Image: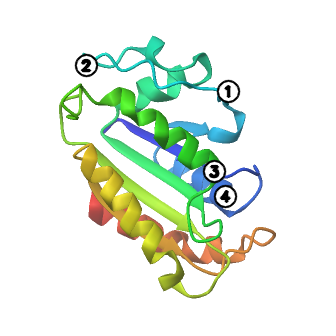
Amino acid sequence: MNTIIINAAVKADGNSSFIADALAKKYEGSKTFDLSGLGFETDYENKYRDGGSFRPEMVEEGLRDIMSAVVDSDLIIFISPNYFGFISGLAKLFLDRFHVLLNKSGRPTFEGNKKFFFILTQGSPNRSHGQSTLDWMKGFCNIFNFKFYGVVVPSCSYSNTDSARVKMEEISMSLSMFI
């Protein structure tokens, strides 16, 4: 199974990064991307959609490898911290670029059954605080016909990865059942 792991955390040493690193070890051979290190254009224009299949030149240079990996993948593991009841700004900027994966009719330009496993880390101990974000992400994945599963990892304050360590078994079990 061709797997990519996308860490959408702004900071490189928090819970989302810890989980991404742990899953990269579990899924040897997967490609891992940290969105914080990629080159996003802030004045990006929606000018690249032409209705055909995805080509790397359809996105800015800093995102070509990751978007090609998305197209080629069978499983996308996407990890984002919960910022004020939503995904990180980097995650949203990245997901906004997915429009290049749709044709003029609004249908995905790729074949196959892709799976999207979403992990939302949050400082709050109440899992329900992330429910609206899970619902939004599920709707987003429906646009692309991704099979979706999402999990909220509570009590993951940025400065302490103890909760993420404890939840790794639960995350791994959920991921194994999903795939």
Q: Which mark is residue 17?
A: none
| Amino acid type, mark 1 | Gly
Is residue 11 at least partly visible in the picture? yes
In the image, what residue type sits under mark 3? Gly
Number of residues whose C-alpha sits closer than 10 Å to that of mark 1, classed few (under 14), some (14–19) or many (20 or more): few
> Badge 2: few (under 14), some or many (20 or more) residues near its Cα, within 10 Å?
some
Give the CA separation, mark 1 to mark 4: 22 Å
* Lower position in the chain sequence, tag 3 or tag 4: 4
Residue 18 disc label: 4
Of residue 2 and residue 90, the one placed in the foreground of this image is: 90
Q: Alpha-carbon distance for marks 2 and 1?
A: 25 Å
Percent x, y of residue 80: 57, 57
Helix, strand or loop at mark 4: helix
Residue that mark 2 sits on: 51
Crowd around label 4: few <14 · some 14–19 · many ≥20 (10 Å): some
In the rendered structure, the answer to whether residue 69 lies left or right of residue 165 reads: left
Q: Where is residue 153? Give x, y as percent.
A: 54, 74
Q: Amino acid at mark 2?
A: Gly
Question: Which sits earlier in the primary sequence, circle 4 or circle 2?
Answer: 4
Q: Nearer the observer, disc 3 or disc 1?
A: 3
Q: Is residue 151 above or below residue 175?
A: below
